[in-house]
């Protein structure tokens, strides 16, 4: 979360080795500082520890904290007050949440509860959501009521909704204030608000009626009224929308934050740009994983775990592949008669599989960004079919010539070429149709994986190939 | 760019139809406003046009502008002064740059030059880079020298470097100033600076020595000296680094902007979070395209263009596939003897292709984020081989049973099973090895496409399958 405005404790050395710093996040930014931190911990020297530790930017404090031995970490929990540790936890990103869970269990409950209560509400909720119900109750009971209430509110929102990533620490003012009074208010809230750069204006029913930026405040005279200054045309998002919507809004409008409202128009929170970056990153990773038929973010260090997570897809597709085998078995006689036909099975299945994967990826992407002209699904499918016919035609022609010359048999070449044309066209159709169907069914098109499309097109390609071949068998045999 | 702080003219209606608004970017946010804008243009009513047009947020102004008929657009160029149009162009994102080029040619040169000079330097450079040299000279000659100089500086930086996305509109102060004087300076620069929320402190040689945030300024007393307040431990990036590095820095530290320095430590620009979001988005799209072997961002509306862009990969892989065919041809005799063998070619090639794609995706991802523990390549490859052995073993066992029962022939089942085990292991090895090799060769691992891996593993799998099968031929025949 954007506490960076508050602290900038990163060694100037980083100007030189910034690249290293970025690519070895789990490494300290400055070896000496790291060494002396460890030393201070081993000497149980709290003062020295704090001096060295706070030399680092919060992000680097987090990276150091994550590399500590359990014993040292426990000491840190005694040296840092809950608020200081909360700042560290606020910046530890999604992937490391699970680790935080284990850390919490090493703490005394009241300390853990305090840490959670000092964190930005959205981050605290992310962590609490992964805890056991009884543990949640314990912490909620131990933390200040105000914090517990904020957390309860956010915990109600479904995963991947705007509500699940919004925070309640924002600055709101009323229309009848002056710039001066707004500034005073801002100074008071500056420490806790997640961003003080946008001020949201609400009416007596706490409904969002306007917005202005800190930029507007500082360039205007102290006596100007807020309602003269504010813009009453506010872009906001509904708390129940998909989080990707708020991400796109911030990306498109170049906002630093977007206000979140209830159906009633009541202002209940904000989503900040730093959270949105992580959302976009996750979405991209999910799409990538979907295309490969594997969770690319797999953090497993053991091959067993990796294999376990990849096998389901492989086995499912294996049985789909069995379908292809049994299909071929119907043509076993034909193959033993003209064994040459078997040479080109992989050529046709492989090439059409590649074409299908291309169509799939394009379709998934188009469905994710329907802002471009051709979001019309019908025309999208038609275009994929035509694209398939053209690329299939070219590929088929090439293969016909090559096979014809190689096998001194242009009838065979023709059979392969025509099969290739048909197989690629069908693969393109499947590649674009399946994501669209999933989208229509309310499923995420990105989960239709590339492996699935290529395995499916193996089946259709073989069917097409042998059906066509059998027509010309008397000429081939 | 972040001009949003200055203008918030978006209809409150959007609170309700925000989703629509987001998913139909090329549509106006408010039909009536759009209608009256068009009407005003057709009536040549500049006043009415301006009143309606400026009701919209800059982003929505951009969307409206992009949908205009050429004739109407020319009128807009007469109604808006260059600064107003520059704000619109500043928010039109990458994808639409090419359109801007055509728009520029419709304008008088001096007007176009003014628009470019009023844009944020980094955006102006993005556009200029796509223009013909003589056109660039014309514009540079017509615009104010100061602007032209800023642009010349940025144009030197290579594509995809920090320099190519940084902007020179930032606020810098000196250590010996007070909070009060800094605020005064800030007010003066607020209009032009891309962000006023971070103030960068420089010494007499313009070297970056500190940073503080507007938050720091407003919570402190006017007489406090900057050097008491600033943090002298600044995270900055080198102007020649890869742009992805600055993106990761901003993502990790949750900054709103990062200062850009020369090797000398001299402060020359900043990169803002909004640009970084687009960088991350592009990188993600490139990875996705790489995995599918197609440019998923293809904006083509014609199937010809799509086919043209996809064919190269298909044809290259076609010839790799021919290799597999000619390999099989060596075993043609064996196949005509035991045609049953041909049933399982696609099963083995398909399954190992899927496994290889999984390994590829995981490897590419790991190489992109080496911050996790196992950035050790050796262990990464070893783990993929072990993962291959395990998943290959399981898959092989399953297939052995199924084939054994189906074909009443457990020797055949065993042959298929062992081939499957070996083929999957090799595919996993290839899937992880190839991206690593590309990375070592200084190429982007993400360009190694899934289609390539599956076509390659077709070859290795067939080789493995028939080599093993030929050993047991006397038992199978």
Image (tube, coloured by chain):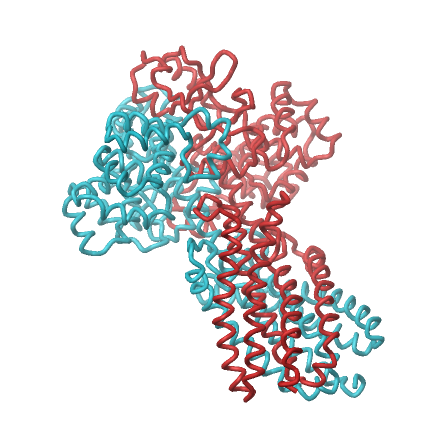
Chain colours: A red, B cyan
Q: Is residue A241 in sight in this rendering?
A: yes
Taking depth in this image into account, of A259 and B132 the one nearest to the observer is B132
Q: Is residue A32 above or below residue B159?
A: above
User: Image quadrant for the N terminus of chain B?
Assistant: top left
Name the spot of residue A213 as percent of width and height, x first.
Answer: 38, 25
Q: Nearer the viewer, residue A188 or A66?
A: A188
The quadrant holding residue B67 is: top left
Q: Residue at x 49, y 35 (%)?
A: B20
Q: Is B239 on the left-hand or right-hand side of A118? A: left
Q: Nearer the viewer, residue A297 or B76?
A: B76
The image quarter in which residue A38 lies: top right
Q: Looking at the image, which residue is at 49% across and 31% down? A: B18
How many numbered circles does the render carry?
0
Q: Is residue B229 visible?
A: no
Task: Quadrant for residue B477, please give it.
Answer: bottom right
Left or right of B129: which side holds B235? right
- Image-based side of B12 in relation to B268, left or right: right
Q: Position of residue B339 (x, y in %)?
A: 73, 82
Tell me what residue is drawn at x 61 percent, y 49 percent: A437
**On screen, residue B200 above or below A319:** above
Q: Position of residue A72 (x, y in %)?
A: 62, 41
Q: Nearer the viewer, residue B203 or A429?
A: A429
Q: Residue at horizontal 39%, vertical 11%?
A: A177
**Residue A205: image x %, image y %?**
52, 13
């Amino acid at each position: 979360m954007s506490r960076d405005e508050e602290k900038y404790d990163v060694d100037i050395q980083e100007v030189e080795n910034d690249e290293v710093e970025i690519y070895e996040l789990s490494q300290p930014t400055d070896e000496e500082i790291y060494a002396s931190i460890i030393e201070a911990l081993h000497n149980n020297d709290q003062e020295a520890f704090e001096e060295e530790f706070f030399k680092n930017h919060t992000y680097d404090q987090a990276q150091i904290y994550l590399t500590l031995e359990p014993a040292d970490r426990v000491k840190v929990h005694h040296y840092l007050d809950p608020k200081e540790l909360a700042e560290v936890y606020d910046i530890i990103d999604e992937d490391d949440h699970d680790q935080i869970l284990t850390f919490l269990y090493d703490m005394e409950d009241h300390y853990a509860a305090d840490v959670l209560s000092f964190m930005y509400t959205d981050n605290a909720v992310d962590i609490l959501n992964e805890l056991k119900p009884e543990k949640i109750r314990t912490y909620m009971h131990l933390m200040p009521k105000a914090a517990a209430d904020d957390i309860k509110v956010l915990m109600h929102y479904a995963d991947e909704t705007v509500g699940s990533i919004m925070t309640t620490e924002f600055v709101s003012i009323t229309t009848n204030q002056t710039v001066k009074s707004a500034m005073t208010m801002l100074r008071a809230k500056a420490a806790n608000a997640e961003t003080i750069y946008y001020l949201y204006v609400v009416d007596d029913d706490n409904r969002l009626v306007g917005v202005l930026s800190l930029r507007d405040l500082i360039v205007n005279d102290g006596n100007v009224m807020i309602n003269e200054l504010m813009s009453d045309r506010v872009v906001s998002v509904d708390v129940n929308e998909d989080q990707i919507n708020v991400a796109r809004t911030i990306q498109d409008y170049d906002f630093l934050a977007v206000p979140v409202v209830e159906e009633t128009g009541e202002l209940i929170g904000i989503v900040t740009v730093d959270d949105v970056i992580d959302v976009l990153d996750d979405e991209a990773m999910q799409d990538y994983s979907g295309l490969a038929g594997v969770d690319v973010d797999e953090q497993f260090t053991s091959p067993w775990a990796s294999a376990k997570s990849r096998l389901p897809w492989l086995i499912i597709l294996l049985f789909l592949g069995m379908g292809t085998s049994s299909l071929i078995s119907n043509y076993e006689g034909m193959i033993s008669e003209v064994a040459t036909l078997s040479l080109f099975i992989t050529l046709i299945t492989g090439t059409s599989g590649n074409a299908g994967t291309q169509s799939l990826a394009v379709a998934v992407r188009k469905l994710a960004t329907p802002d471009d002209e051709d979001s019309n699904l019908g025309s999208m499918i038609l275009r994929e079919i035509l694209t398939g016919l053209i690329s299939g035609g070219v590929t088929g022609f090439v293969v016909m010539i090559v096979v014809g010359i190689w096998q001194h048999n242009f009838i065979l070449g023709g059979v392969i070429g025509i099969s290739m044309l048909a197989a690629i066209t069908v693969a393109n159709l499947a590649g674009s149709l399946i994501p669209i169907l999933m989208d229509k069914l309310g499923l995420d098109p990105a989960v239709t994986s590339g492996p699935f499309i290529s395995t499916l097109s193996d089946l259709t390609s073989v069917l097409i190939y042998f059906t066509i071949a059998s027509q010309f068998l008397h000429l081939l045999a």
